[in-house]
Structures are given as C-alpha cells and as structure tokens.
Amino acid sequence: MSRQRDIQDSINGIGERVSERVRHYADEAAERAGSLTERGQRLRERFGQRQGQYGRRIAHAAEDLADEANYQYRRLRRQVKRHPTATVAIVAGTVGAFLLLRHIFRSDDD
C-alpha cells in the first residue's frame, strides 16, 4: 500500500507543478486577451471615425477574439483545478504524440 501512496504522491506533485505552469500560461493568455480587447477598442475608435461600417466590423471581430480567448482561459483553469491528474495525462500524451511524430518525420528525411 505504501508504494501505491508514493506513486499517487509523485503524480499529485507532478500535477501541481503542471497546474502551476498551466495557470502561468493561462494568466499570460488572459493578459493578451485584455490587450487584444484594448487594441480592438482603439482600432474601433480610429477606423470608426474614418471608415464607418468597416471599422465597426474589425472592432467586433477583435472583441469576439478576445472574448473567446478569455473563455478558453477560464475553461482551462477550471479543468486544471478540478482534474490536475487528468490534465497531466493530457499534456503528457500531447507532448508524447508530438515527439513521436517528430521522430517519424525526421526518420523519413534521413
């Protein structure tokens, strides 16, 4: 039973480190979403005076993009908070698949 607890503790430790890193990236994404919103508002003001309808469409598209980034950020934070071990498994699987594909495509080039 002790070995199983050690394995669980090590997985939880990895999960906490990964969740901290994911939170860090999510915070950066939120900052970028905020800057995109600000840029969209500035573009709307600048193009809105000159271009009318075109400026409004660009501004709405920029705001929609920022809203979507913010939604994905919040969704990711909830996922990490609720299921840290599953998040670690997903990240590990993604990285493993990337490395495998990279190895396969490099082998073809040689």
Image (cartoon, rainbow, N blue to C red):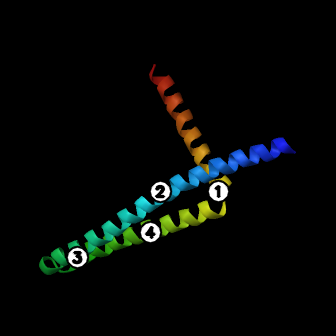
Q: Mark 2 — residue?
A: 24
Mark 1–mark 3 distance (CA, rounded to whole Å): 40 Å
Mark 2–mark 3 distance (CA, rounded to whole Å): 30 Å
Residue that sits furthest to the right in the current view: 1
Q: Mark 1 — residue?
A: 84
Mark 1–mark 2 distance (CA, rounded to whole Å): 15 Å
Q: Nearer the viewer, residue 106 or 39?
A: 39
Identify the residue shown where x is 48% and y is 64%.
Answer: 73
Identify the residue shown where x is 35% and y is 69%.
Answer: 34
Q: Quadrant of residue 63?
A: bottom left
Q: Quadrant of the N terminus?
A: top right
> Residue 53 vs residue 109: left or right?
left
Identify the residue shown where x is 31% and y is 67%.
Answer: 35
Q: Nearer the viewer, residue 27 or 107?
A: 27
For marks 2 and 3 on the same chain, the one whose residue lies earlier in the sequence:
2
Mark 3–mark 4 distance (CA, rounded to whole Å): 20 Å
User: Percent x, y for residue 13?
Assistant: 65, 49
Q: Mark 3 — residue?
A: 44
Q: Amino acid at mark 3?
A: Arg
Rendered position, 104 above or below 97 = above
For marks 4 and 2 on the same chain, the one whose residue lies earlier in the sequence:
2
Disc 2 element? helix
Identify the residue shown where x is 47% and y is 26%.
Answer: 106
Q: Mark 4 — residue?
A: 70
Disc 3 element? helix
